Image (cartoon, grey):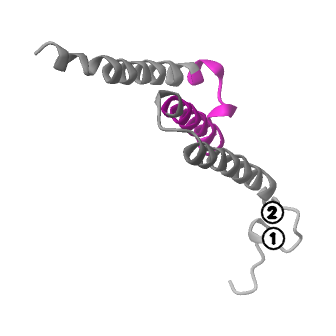
C-alpha cells in the first residue's frame, strides 16, 4: 500500500485547488468598515434626537442585509426564497417600531 498512487488526492499540479477569493472578502470588509465609520461620524457630530436614531436603525439594517447576503449567500438564491425571508423580517421590524412609538402612550392613560 505504501507505493500505491491515488491521483484523486494528488494536488501537486496546482490545477485542482481553487485560488482563494480574498478580493471579495476584502471588498466586504471595506464596505462594512466604511458604513461603521460613517456611523461613528454621525454618532459624534449629530445631536441625540429621533433623526440620529432613525439613521442608526437604517444603517444597521443595511449592514445586516449585506452580511446576510454575502456570508450566508442569500443574494445568490432564487428571488422567492429571498422574499419569503425578507417579508416576515420587515413585518417584525414594523411591529417593533410600532410598539416603541405607541408603547409610551400607556403612561398617558393613567
| Numbered disc 2: secondary structure | loop
Q: Position of residue 100 (x, y in %)?
A: 33, 24
Closer mark to the observer between disc 1 and disc 2 = 2
| Numbered disc 1: secondary structure | loop
Q: Residue sitting at 65 percent across and 29 percent down?
A: 77
Give above or below for 29 relative to 73. Answer: below
Q: Position of residue 23 (x, y in %)?
A: 81, 55
Q: CA distance from mark 1 to mark 2?
A: 7 Å
In this view, which residue lies farthest toward the bottom?
A: 2
Q: Quadrant of the C terminus?
A: top left
Task: Determine crowd level at label 2: few under 14, some 14-19, many 20+ residues with C-alpha closer than 10 A.
Answer: few
Residue ID for mark 1: 11
Highlighted range, magenta:
53-82
Q: Position of residue 75 (x, y in %)?
A: 67, 32
Image side of residue 78 versus residue 22, left or right: left
Task: Determine crowd level at label 1: few under 14, some 14-19, many 20+ residues with C-alpha closer than 10 A.
Answer: few
- Upstream in the sequence, badge 1 or badge 2? 1
Q: Quadrant of residue 12?
A: bottom right
Q: Residue sitting at 60 percent across and 39 percent down?
A: 63
Residue ID for mark 2: 17
Magenta segment's dominant SS is helix
Q: Is residue 49 magenta?
A: no
Q: Do tag 1 and tag 2 residues touch (Cβ < 8 Å)?
A: yes
Q: Position of residue 11 (x, y in %)?
A: 81, 70
Q: Residue sitting at 77 percent across and 58 percent down?
A: 22
Amino acid at each position: 500500500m505504501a507505493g500505491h498512487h491515488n491521483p484523486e488526492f494528488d494536488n501537486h499540479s496546482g490545477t485542482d485547488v481553487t485560488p482563494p477569493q480574498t478580493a471579495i472578502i476584502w471588498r466586504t470588509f471595506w464596505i462594512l468598515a466604511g458604513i461603521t465609520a460613517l456611523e461613528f461620524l454621525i454618532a459624534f457630530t449629530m445631536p441625540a434626537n429621533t433623526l440620529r436614531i432613525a439613521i442608526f436603525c437604517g444603517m444597521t439594517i443595511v449592514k445586516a442585509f449585506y452580511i446576510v447576503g454575502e456570508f450566508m449567500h442569500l443574494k445568490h438564491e432564487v428571488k422567492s426564497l429571498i422574499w419569503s425571508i425578507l417579508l416576515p423580517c420587515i413585518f417584525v421590524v414594523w411591529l417593533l417600531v410600532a410598539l416603541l412609538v405607541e408603547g409610551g402612550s400607556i403612561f398617558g392613560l393613567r
